[in-house]
Image (spheres, rainbow, N blue to C red):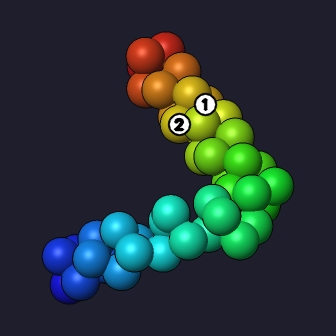
Amino acid sequence: MRQQIRAVMRMAGPRMLLLHPIDTLRHFYRERQRDRRYTKEVKSK
């Protein structure tokens, strides 16, 4: 299942960047913020 998701995202990612650049950047920013918050929580425990 994960391999199928990766295959789809491998095709969809670059296309999304070209067709919806603002949405793509917003998505990357939100994911980075989420990852940073999660890392802080894990380190503080």
Q: Residue furthest front?
A: 18
Q: Is residue 4 above or below residue 39?
A: below
The disc labelled 1 sits on which kind of residue?
Arg
Which residue lies under the disc numbered 1? Answer: 37
The disc labelled 2 sits on which kind of residue?
Asp
In the image, what residue occupies the spot 59% across and 36% down?
32
Give residue 35's mark. 2
Q: CA distance from mark 2 to mark 1?
A: 5 Å
Residue 30 visible within the image: no
Q: Is residue 24 above or below residue 45?
A: below
Residue nearer the viewer, 17 or 27: 17
Where's residue 13, x and y in %?
49, 65
**Label 1 secondary element:** helix
In the image, what residue occupies the spot 56% across and 71% down?
15
Quarter holding residue 45: top left
Q: Quadrant of the N terminus?
A: bottom left
